[in-house]
Amino acid sequence: MEKERLVRKFDKQAARYDRSREQRALGAWREALLRDVHGHVFEAAVGAGANFPFYRNKNMSLTAVDFSPAMVQTATQAARRYGIEANIYQHDLETLEFPDESFDTVVSTLSLCGYDDPVAVLHKFNRWCKKDGQILLLEHGTSSFYGLKVLQHAINPLFRSMSGCHLNRDMLSLIAQSPLVLTSSERHFYGMMHLIRATPGPS
């Protein structure tokens, strides 16, 4: 029932989606993270396709999922607009499976805040990525400033109810609990935004 409520929430967001936001929303960070995306790419929780303007390599192919049917429809239209070869379909990523080493690049932007078990999702990314591949994450989490962190914990229940995601997850701790091998990490916007590059580790 909780997941159905979240799907309805994100369907409504897709209906309000403004194409101009693709360039504005976190655009500089998306561009920095995604400039080297290549090969067969998997994107988790694709949303309305906000990453698509930053996929510069037109020889790539994309498999993407979202649990919101309305988001899948909007992202499919965006892929056509940007000339991206894409297979985008509706599925709950937490119950999704692919064969091991299916993808050259795994991308997640602003998705780990929403899963019931984000570490289990990172294990999936680790298995699905080829051993010489890359895993690219743009995620929000707890601030590196103590006062902001306390505030995030305090308002998280309300934020979760309104937006469908957790405001107070420690992203670097989640990475440490996963098999991913961290290659670089940047923190921005009071330490709340994380640009993370990783490679697969032992499963």
Image (cartoon, rainbow, N blue to C red):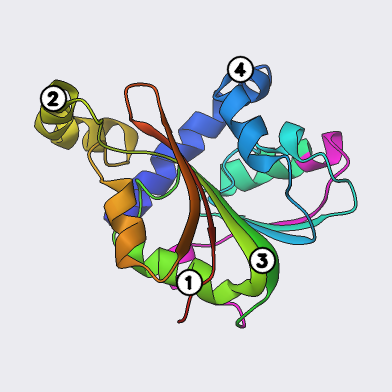
Say which element carries label 4: helix
Q: Where the C terminus falls, by quadrant?
A: bottom left
Q: Where the N terminus falls, by quadrant?
A: bottom left
Q: Amino acid at mark 1?
A: Lys
- Residue at coordinates 57% horizontally, 29% vertically from top-left? 29
Q: Mark 2: few, some, or many residues within 10 Å (few <14, many ≥20)? A: some
Residue 151's tag is 2
Residue 17 in sight from this viewpoint: no
Residue 24's tag is 4
Residue 133's tag is 3
Q: Amino acid at mark 4?
A: Arg
- Residue at coordinates 40% horizontally, 38% vertically from top-left? 9
Magenta range is 79-99
Say which element carries label 3: strand
Q: Nearer the viewer, residue 25 or 65?
A: 25
Say which element carries label 1: helix
Can you say whether 102 is above or below 12 in the image?
A: below
**Which residue lies most toward the front here?**
183
Q: Nearer the viewer, mark 4 or mark 3?
A: 3
| Residue 192: quarter of image | top left
Is the Cβ of the residue at disc 4 closer than 8 Å to that at disc 3? no
Residue 89 included in the magenta stretch of the image = yes
Indicate the position of residue 11 as horizontal and vertical percent values.
50, 39
